Image (cartoon, helix red, strand yellow):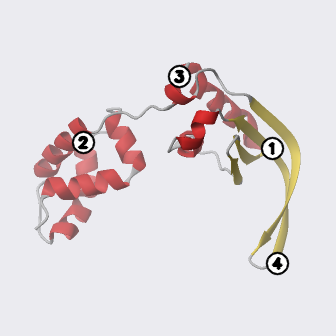
Amino acid sequence: MITVPEATQTIIKRSRYLTEAISKGIINNSSLARYIKPEIEEMLVKKVSISSIIMALKRVSSEIKPKYFTGNVFKTPPQIIVHSNLDSKETKGLGTQEFKLKDLSSITIKLPYEAIKTPGILYFFVKSIAWEGINIIKVETSASGISLIFEKKDINRAFSIIQSLFSKSV
């Protein structure tokens, strides 16, 4: 039979957002315990107390270490290229629906060789932008770079966010 700590750990480990927030110590354990309580009770098929979940969260928190890869991958800030006034012709399905998006801009981040074998590199950028409530229209990746396509109105904020990631890590 699964225990409260095991159920708690399962929930935390499957969510990159929760893992990161816990590793940085920026999450309130009481609030998180109340939030995950229904799921834990469903997993255990019994009622559990908030205090037992809080204790489990404290144990899990002590095991989770912050994962910062940017210092290892980005020795210097990468080249960042911004393109504006892009139009995109998109096709959905098997050519059944076609639409054109206008007033798009892109940010391309050149990646160092080490990034090829670094898990989470795309997440690092996408998460930072998503947390600020900016919509990414399209993501294009290659071994040498990541291109993020935005509506023109969001490009300045997105650029500031990406730029700030490297002013902290270098």
> Is 56 placed above or below 69 here?
below
Mark 3 neighbour class, 10 Å CA radius: few under 14, some 14 to 19, many 20 or more: some
Q: Position of residue 153 (x, y in %)?
A: 77, 42
Query: Circle 4 — which element?
Result: loop
Towards the viewer: 96 or 108: 108
Q: Quadrant of the N terminus?
A: bottom left
The reply to whether dot 2 and dot 1 touch (C-beta < 8 Å) is no
- Ranked by sequence position, the earlier of labels 2 and 3 is 2
Query: Circle 3 — which element?
Result: helix
> Is 27 placed above or below 138 here?
above
The residue beneath circle 1 is 105
User: What amino acid is labelled 1 in the image?
Assistant: Ser
CA–CA distance in space, label 3 to label 4: 44 Å
Q: Position of residue 157 (x, y in %)?
A: 68, 34
Residue at 82% x, 48% y: name it.
104
- Ranked by sequence position, the earlier of labels 1 and 3 is 1
CA–CA distance in space, label 2 to label 3: 28 Å
CA–CA distance in space, label 1 to label 4: 25 Å
Towards the viewer: 127 or 66: 66
The residue beneath circle 2 is 29
User: What amino acid is labelled 3 in the image?
Assistant: Ser
Please name which of the two marks, 1 or 4, marks the residue nearer to the observer.
4
- Ranked by sequence position, the earlier of labels 1 and 4 is 4
The residue beneath circle 4 is 95
Q: Position of residue 102 (x, y in %)?
A: 86, 54
User: What amino acid is labelled 4 in the image?
Assistant: Gly
Apparent side of residue 30 relative to residue 147 in the rendered image (left or right): left
The reply to whether dot 4 and dot 2 touch (C-beta < 8 Å) is no
- Ranked by sequence position, the earlier of labels 4 and 2 is 2
Mark 1 neighbour class, 10 Å CA radius: few under 14, some 14 to 19, many 20 or more: many
Residue at 31% x, 32% y: name it.
25
The residue beneath circle 3 is 169
